[in-house]
Image (cartoon, rainbow, N blue to C red):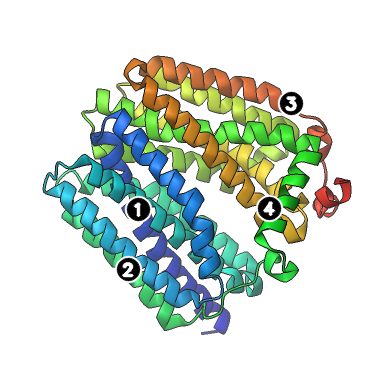
Amino acid sequence: MSNNSRTKRKLTLYLVSRESGISAIKFMLLSYMALNLSQKQFSVAYILTLVLLMLLTPIALSLIRNKNYNILLASSSAILLIASFTGISLYSTQFEEKSFLILTFAVCSFLINICESVASSSLTNIKATHPQDAVKLTRGIVAAAGIIVPTLMGYAMLTSNAIPLIVSSGCLLLSVMFLYKTKLYSHPGHSYNDKAKLSFTKRLTMSATVKWHIRMERYYLVIAIINQILITLVSLVVVPMIIKENFSGSEFSFGLAQSGTALGLALMSFYALGKLSKILSHYTLASAGLAGASIGILSLIFFQDNIVGIMIGLTLYGASVGAYGIIGSSKRIQAYPDNLRLSLSALDQSLSKLGIVLAFIVVYFYSDQLSISMLTLCISIIYLFCAIALLYVPNWKQFTEMDDKELKGYYEKITP
C-alpha cells in the first residue's frame, strides 16, 4: 500500500471518529437544553456559553499555541468527556438543579469549541501536503456526520441516554487513539499570523482598519452578522419551539429537523452550487440564497405539525443559506491580506457572537410573548430584506465577478 493511501486511510479513521463523537455530544447537550428548559433558562445558558467563548477561547488558544497538538487534543477530549458525562448523567437521573445544568452546558460547549479549533489547526500539515484529499475528506465527513448523527442519536435517546453517551465517548477516545498511533499531527502548523509575527493588539487594530475603510466590507458585514443571528434563532429557538409544542419535545423529531438542515447544506455544497453557478452569476445566486432561506423558514408556519414538511422546509433553508455563505465566505477570505486572514475571520466571528448575545437578551425578556408563527414570519421578512439589501451593497457585483487571481490580496490593495 502506498504512503498516500495509508495517510488517507489514517486521516479518514481519525476524522470519522472525531466528527461522530463531537457531533453526538453536541446534539445530546443541545437537545436536552433546548427541549427541556424554558426559553428564558435556555437563553441564559446560551448567553453564558457565548460569553465564555468570547472571553476565554483567544486566551486558551494563545497559551497552548506552541504546544504539541496531540497532547492538547487528547487532554481537551478527556475533559470534554468528563464534563459531558457529568451533565448528561445528571439529566438521566432527573437531576433538578437547573442552574448546574446551565453551567454544565456552557462549559461543555466551550470545551467542544476548543477541541474543534485545535483539531482544525492540527490538520494544517496534512492539508499542506495533501490539500485536495484532506479538504474533500474533511468537508465530506463533517457533512455526513451532520446529516446522520442527529437522527441516530435522537432515535437512540428515545429509549436510553446511556447508549448514545457510550457511543459518543467511544468515538472521541478512538479519535485520540488514532491521533497518537498515526503521528500524523505531531507538529502544529503555522498560520499566516505566526509568519508575520504581529502582536494580538496590532492584528486587531489592523483588522478593524481593513473592515472600516472598505465600504463594501462594512455593508456586507452587517448582512453577514444578521444572517448568523437568524441562523442561531432558527436552530435554537424556532425549531425547538415547534418540536416542544407539536411533537412533545421528541429528541428523534429534533434530530430529524437538524439532519434536514445539514442535508440541504451538503447538497448545495457538493452538488447544486456547481450546477447553479453555470446558470446564475454569484451576485444573483447569493441574493437568491437569502430569498430561498426566507421561503424555507416561511414554510415552517404551514408545516408545524408535519415532521416531513418541517424537514423539507429546513432542507431548503440549509441549501439556501449554504449558497449565500459559501459564495460570500470563499471570495472574502481570498481577498483578505495574508497576514490578517485569520484575524479578520476571528473578528467576524466575534462580532457575530456579540450580535447573537444581544438577540438572546431580547429573547429572554420577550420569551413569554413569543409565538412560533410571529417569530418565524419576522425571521422570514428579515431574510427577504437582506436578500434585497445584498443587491445594493457597493461594489459587491464587481467583487463577485472577480476570478481567484484578482481576488488574492484584493483588500490589501484597496485599503488606504
Residue receiving disc 4: 204
User: Percent x, y for residue 383?
Assistant: 57, 24
Looking at marks 2 and 4 on the same chain, the residue that comes earlier in the sequence is marked by 2
Q: Nearer the viewer, mark 2 or mark 3?
A: 2
Mark 3 lies on residue: 391
Dot 4 surroundings within 10 Å: few (below 14), some, or many (20 or more)?
some
Report the side of 283 relative to 150 (left or right): right
Task: Give the label, 2 or 1, closer to the camera.
Answer: 1
Camera-nearest label, 1 or 4:
4
The CA span between labels 3 and 4 is 29 Å
Residue type pointed to by label 1? Val
Position in image of residue 381 (x %, y %): 55, 17
Q: Is residue 72 left or right of residue 157?
A: right
Residue 342 lies, with reference to residue 99, above or below; the image says below
Question: Residue tagged by mark 1?
Answer: 107
Give the label, 3 or 1, closer to the camera: 1
> Which quarter of the picture shows residue 89?
bottom left
Q: CA distance from mark 3 to mark 1?
A: 40 Å
| Place of residue 108 in the rendered image (x, y in percent of width and height, measured from the top left) | 34, 54
Q: Which residue is mark 2?
A: 78
The nearer-to-camera label among 2 and 4 is 4
Tag 2: residue type?
Answer: Ala
Classify mark 1: helix, strand or loop.
helix
